[in-house]
Amino acid sequence: MTAAGVRIDPPRSPSTRRLRGRTNTELYAWLFMRVSGILLVVLVLGHLFIMNILDGGVQRINFGFVAGRWASPFWQVWDLLMLWLAQLHGSNGLRTVINDYTRKDATRFWLKMALYTASVVVIALGTLVIFTFDPSIS
Amino acid sequence: MTAVAERPVAVEAPKARTVEVKIRRYNPEISDEVRWVTYRVEAYPTDRVLNLLTKIKDEQDGTLTFRRSCAHGVCGSDAMRINGVNRLACKVLMKDMPAKLTIEPIKGLPVEKDLVVDMEPFFEAYRAVKPFLITGGNPPTKEWLQSQADRDRYDDTTKCILCAACTTSCPVFWTDGSYFGPAAIVNAHRFIFDSRDQGAEERLEILNDREGVWRCRTTFNCTEACPRGIEITKAIKEVKQALLFRRV
């Protein structure tokens, strides 16, 4: 390995990061991906069906239509669940991609920070709109 | 009286053909550059890729370096990337191969020379899962009996020959070298599900780590690459299940 000054880093880095005591984070993340995936199939397909296919489809969607739907707590919860699950599911997927494809610790850190910031902003804004939506706004 | 065939069946002698073998050459003692060298060799349908490599080394270029030991698919020395897939060179028959071969070292491990890679990171992951029998209490005074059903539980994963074909076909291992890799998980599975072993909890804990089984993306590359036909992805799934339900 050391011949002629050639140094190739072993792909398996020294085990400083491993075995830091008991954590189930990855287990829960893995489980969350499965459960949220199944729920999202129902929520998203249902959403698409109602919005795009059911009587009149996308043509009937306007401010009044959305206001009417969000008057019901059922659709509020539906949309809220869809927002949170989709955003967390997607973020966790991207987190995995970042972990896989970044080589430098700094790159990994900043990409993840950008991802987490974006997720928090989207979730917060969406939740705010669903709960504070005012149908009487002119 | 011996039976004599009235009309002897014409058995065609296997015909040799010329095969182009393109090999990735690298020798850090001479140059840091990788070269692709093409050799033309006569190959019989009954030849294995390993025979071709030996022929090249014997007759054309003695500097060609590769590992091989038993040459019968048991020692696990000659795993390499043949036409883009990980195979044991001693198990690939030329009758199944096209007239052009591309041979590279297995991916994801540091290349030392030509087709020889540094297997240490691979074995480090293997050792990390404690691939040996762990027991407590008094040892049995006579043979430790096990039912056929108990043995069948982990039979598949006992077949591993540690050739690294699976681990070096795994895209997660390519990009994240600290992932334990399929081979280490297979060998952990072999003990986790052994009814005589008592170290399951310990091994499961090791594989529950960030670089453990949860990194598996079920791409089935490992199962496809295994020269022993081990259902690796299934074994990894069983370890995940054992972790999820805290039950072996």
Image (spheres, rainbow, N blue to C red):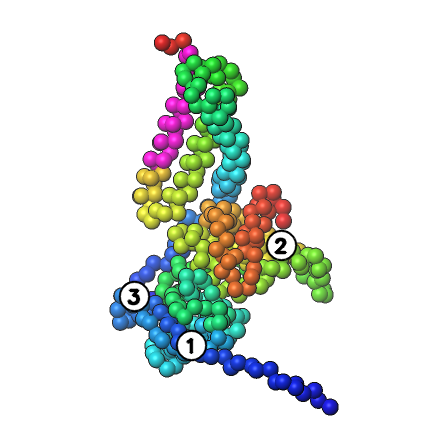
Q: Say if the magenta span includes residue A38.
A: no
On whether residue A131 falls in the magenta region, the answer is yes
Q: Residue at x 71, y 65 (%)?
A: B143
Chain for numbered disc 3? B
Tell me residue A74's x, y (percent): 53, 19
Whether discs 3 and 2 lie on one chain: the answer is yes
Magenta-drawn segment: A113-135
Labels 3, 1: front one: 1
Per the image, the residue denoted by label 2 is B193
The N terminus of chain B sits in image quarter = bottom right
Label 3 crowding class (10 Å Cα cut-off): few <14, some 14-19, many 20+?
Answer: few
- Prevailing secondary structure of the magenta residues: helix
In this rendering, would B243 be left or right of B42? Answer: right
The residue where tag 1 is placed is B17
Q: Do labels 1 and 2 touch, CB within 8 Å? A: no
Q: Is residue B245 above or below residue A127?
A: below
Q: Secondary structure at mark 1?
A: strand
Mark 3 on the same chain as mark 1: yes
Report in which chain the residue with disc 2 lies.
B
Q: Quadrant of residue B31?
A: bottom left
Q: Nearer the viewer, residue A50 or A116?
A: A50
Q: Nearer the viewer, residue A102 or B137?
A: A102
Amino acid identity at mark 1: Arg
Q: Name the outermost residue toward the front.
A: B7
| Residue type pointed to by label 2 | Phe
The answer to whether residue A117 is left or right of residue A53 is left
Q: Disc 3 vs disc 2: which is toward the camera? A: 3
